[in-house]
C-alpha cells in the first residue's frame, strides 16, 4: 500500500524500528517464492505480478499468506453462491449479510491519511500533520490490496446485478486510527482501542466502546423503504451503511457516522494535534532525565554502600 511520490519521506525505512522488524522471524525468501510460484491454486497471483522486496519484509510473504487464505475464501464463496442460486428467484429476502475480517489494511483507501475514499489517487497534501514521514513509512507495512481482492471475490457477480442489496462489511485493525466509510459498495470499519498516548492525543476517542455493526435479531427485507431510511441530512455527521450514504440498512446492519480522519473531525484538528505531540515530546524528555538522574543516584548509593562495607572489613 506504499504511497506514490512519497519515497523521499521513507529514506530511513530500512533503519526504522518497526516492531514487526524486530520481533518477527520470517521464512527465507527462496522458500516463500518457491511455495508461491509453484502453487497449483488457480487464484495464485505471485506468478502473475512482480514480487517486490519492501525493506525487511521478505519477497513472497504477502503472496504466501494470500494463498493461505484462498481455501477459506473459496469455501465461503461456494456457500454464498449456493444460497443466492436458491434465493434470488424467490424475491422474499435479501442475500445474507457478509462480514469479513482482517488485521491488516485491505486497500490504500483505509490508510490513516487517505482523505477521499472515492479516489484512487493519493494527494501528498493530505500529509498535512507534524509526522508525514511516519505515515509514509507505515503505508509500506500497513497491509495489501490482495486482501481487498479476496474479500470482494466472495460475492458472486450475479448478486451485484439484482435489485437485492448485498450488505458487505469489512472490519480491520492494525493502524490504530478509526475509520468507517463506504467505497464501491463495501463498508470498511476500524474501531480501535488504541494506546493510552493515542487516546491522549485525540487520535482515538478517549471514551472507546464496542461498536454494534450488526443485529442478528433483524431480518433482511427484500425492499427498502427509502422514506423511512433517510436520516437528518442537516446533521453534522453523515450516517452510512454498506448500501449507501445517509441511509439506514435494511436487515441486520447497524449504520454509523462516517469517519475518515478522526483526529481532524473529532479531535480538534491540526493545531490541537501539533500541540499535543509537542507537549508529549517535552514530557518524555523530562521523564527520561528523571530516570537517568535516579539511575545515577542509585549507582552512587550502591558504590558508597559497597565502599563502607569494604572499610568495615
Image (cartoon, helix red, strand yellow):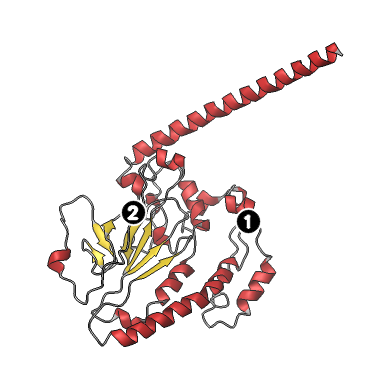
Q: Which residue is mark 2?
A: 260
Q: CA distance from mark 1 to mark 2?
A: 31 Å
Q: Residue 300 lies in what quarter of the image?
A: top right
Q: Residue 221 lies in what quarter of the image?
A: bottom left
- Per the rendering, the mark at residue 15 is none
Residue located 34% across and 48% down the image = 262
Q: Percent x, y for residue 258?
A: 29, 56
Of all residues, the one furthest to the top in this rendering is 312
* Foreground pick, 298 / 198: 298
* Foreground pick, 233 / 229: 229
Answer above or below: position of 64 versus 157: above
Nearer-N-terminus badge (1/2): 1
Q: Percent x, y for residue 261?
A: 35, 50
| In-image side of 100 versus 216 (left or right) | right
Answer above or below: position of 198 versus 284: below
Answer above or below: position of 293 versus 173: above
Q: Percent x, y for residue 147?
A: 47, 68
- Tell me if residue 220 can be seen: yes
Q: Percent x, y for residue 111?
A: 42, 56
Of all residues, the one furthest to the left in this rendering is 227
Q: Residue 46 lies in what quarter of the image?
A: bottom right
Q: Which residue is mark 1?
A: 24
* Foreground pick, 245 / 229: 229
- Tell me if residue 118 can be seen: no
Residue located 62% across and 57% down the image = 56
Amino acid at each position: 500500500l506504499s504511497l506514490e511520490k512519497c519515497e523521499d519521506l521513507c529514506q530511513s525505512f530500512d533503519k526504522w524500528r518497526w516492531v514487526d522488524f524486530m520481533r518477527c522471524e520470517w521464512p527465507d525468501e527462496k522458500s516463500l517464492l518457491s511455495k508461491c510460484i509453484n502453487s497449483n491454486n488457480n487464484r495464485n497471483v505471485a506468478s502473475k505480478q512482480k514480487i517486490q522486496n519492501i525493506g525487511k519484509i521478505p519477497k513472497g510473504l504477502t503472496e504466501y499468506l494470500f494463498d493461505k487464505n484462498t481455501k477459506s475464501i473459496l469455501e465461503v464463496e461456494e456457500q454464498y453462491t449456493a444460497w443466492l442460486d436458491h434465493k434470488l428467484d424467490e424475491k422474499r429476502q435479501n442475500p445474507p449479510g457478509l462480514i469479513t475480517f482482517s488485521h491488516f489494511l485491505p486497500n490504500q483507501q483505509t490508510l490513516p491519511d487517505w482523505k477521499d475514499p472515492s479516489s484512487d489517487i493519493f494527494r501528498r497534501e493530505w500529509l498535512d500533520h507534524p509526522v508525514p514521514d511516519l505515515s509514509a513509512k507505515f503505508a509500506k507495512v500497513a497491509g495489501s490490496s490482495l486482501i481487498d481482492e479476496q474479500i470482494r471475490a466472495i460475492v458472486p457477480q450475479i448478486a451485484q446485478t439484482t435489485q437485492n442489496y448485498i450488505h458487505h462489511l469489512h472490519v480491520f485493525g492494525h493502524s490504530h486510527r478509526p475509520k468507517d466509510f463506504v467505497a464501491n459498495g463495501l463498508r470498511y470499519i476500524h474501531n480501535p482501542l488504541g494506546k493510552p498516548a493515542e487516546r491522549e492525543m485525540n487520535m482515538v476517542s478517549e471514551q472507546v466502546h464496542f461498536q454494534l455493526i450488526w443485529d442478528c435479531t433483524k431480518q433482511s427485507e427484500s425492499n427498502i423503504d427509502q422514506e423511512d431510511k433517510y436520516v437528518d441530512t442537516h446533521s453534522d455527521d453523515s450516517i452510512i451503511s454498506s448500501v449507501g450514504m445517509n441511509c439506514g440498512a435494511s436487515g441486520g446492519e447497524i449504520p454509523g457516522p462516517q469517519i475518515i480522519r478522526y483526529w481532524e473531525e473529532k479531535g480538534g484538528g491540526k493545531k490541537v494535534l501539533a500541540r499535543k505531540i509537542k507537549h508529549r515530546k517535552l514530557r518524555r524528555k523530562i521523564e527520561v532525565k528523571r530516570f537517568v538522574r535516579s539511575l545515577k543516584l542509585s549507582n552512587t548509593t550502591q558504590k558508597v554502600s559497597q565502599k563502607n562495607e569494604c572499610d568495615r572489613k
